[in-house]
Image (cartoon, rainbow, N blue to C red):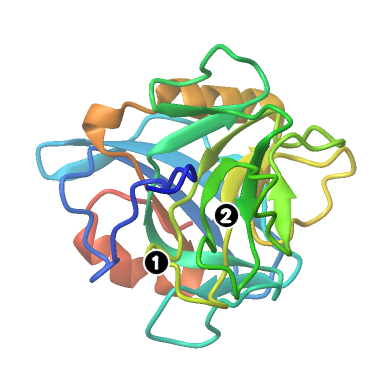
């Protein structure tokens, strides 16, 4: 087995959240905006109840791109954050001590995420192999420290070449500029999010434009669309 550690990837077959007791909902006003609002929900009986106040988040420089089924689709380098439903199974950070109950990836100077669409390790996270260096990769210990704390959004679970890679929750840039395709926020909301995640509750992200919210609301009773 390669030393590269794959996050637990699953194909998103439908918008249903099978077994998810924790739901992060990010709603943007439309597909092309670079900001959105995030609310955390927990499921009780047949309803999702909000357990946090809405929090402002920053999206990709080109807005949102769908994971499948409709346009615009997300592709590598397009600057769009993925729209759809995604597992959240790992956190990461620069401190050797975990920041979450999720499986933890220590972001030392060897940890990378491969974004080379022609590499068989595309969209995987692991230690840099000096004997097999990818043509393109992202260091998980960045000079700007926006990956000081974060979590993996398991987009492109089948690692389809060119459909996008290395998608995370992470810290805002100091000027809160748009991301390259991740979802960013201020430090305290991010730490609150990471501390809230419970792997036994199978946390997931629902990230969508407001125009699609009523459709998803039929599946996920209790989420707010405003």
Where disc 2 sits, the SS reads: loop
Question: Which one is in front, 139 or 50?
Answer: 139
Q: Dot 2 surroundings within 10 Å: few (below 14), some, or many (20 or more)?
A: many
Query: According to the image, label 2 marks what residue?
Result: 167
**Residue 65 location, quadrant:** bottom right
* Rendering coords of residue 148 (x, y %): 70, 28
* Rendering coords of residue 187 (x, y %): 69, 27
For the point 45% across and 30% down, which residue is it?
52
Residue 145 vs 180, above or below: the answer is: above
199 displayed left or right of 210: left
89 displayed left or right of 26: left
161 displayed left or right of 130: left
For the point 74% across and 56% down, which residue is it?
179
Q: Looking at the image, which residue sits at the far bottom?
A: 71
For the point 33% across and 39% down, which residue is it?
203
Report how far apart the C-alphas of labels 1 and 2 lie in the structure.
Answer: 22 Å
Query: According to the image, label 1 marks what residue?
Result: 213
Q: Dot 1 surroundings within 10 Å: few (below 14), some, or many (20 or more)?
A: many
């Amino acid at each position: 087995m390669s030393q590269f550690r794959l996050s637990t990837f699953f194909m998103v077959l439908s918008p249903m959240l099978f077994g998810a007791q924790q739901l992060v909902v990010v709603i943007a006003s439309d597909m092309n905006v670079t900001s959105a609002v995030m609310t955390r929900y927990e499921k009780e009986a047949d309803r999702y109840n909000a357990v946090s106040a809405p929090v402002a988040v920053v999206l990709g420089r080109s807005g949102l791109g769908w994971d499948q089924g409709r346009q615009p689709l997300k592709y590598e380098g397009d600057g769009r954050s993925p729209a759809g439903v995604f597992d959240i199974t790992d956190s990461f950070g620069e401190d050797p001590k975990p920041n979450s109950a999720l499986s933890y990836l220590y972001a030392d100077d060897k940890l990378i995420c491969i974004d080379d669409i022609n590499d068989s390790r595309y969209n995987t996270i692991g230690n840099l192999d000096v004997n097999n260096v990818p043509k393109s990769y992202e260091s998980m210990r960045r000079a700007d420290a926006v990956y000081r704390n974060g979590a993996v959004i398991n987009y492109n679970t089948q690692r389809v070449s060119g459909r996008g890679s290395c998608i995370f929750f992470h810290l805002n840039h100091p000027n809160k500029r748009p991301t390259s395709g991740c979802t960013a926020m201020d430090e305290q909301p991010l730490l609150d999010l990471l501390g809230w995640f419970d792997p036994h509750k199978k946390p997931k992200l629902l990230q969508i434009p407001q125009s699609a919210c009523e459709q998803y609301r039929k599946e996920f009773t209790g989420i707010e669309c405003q």
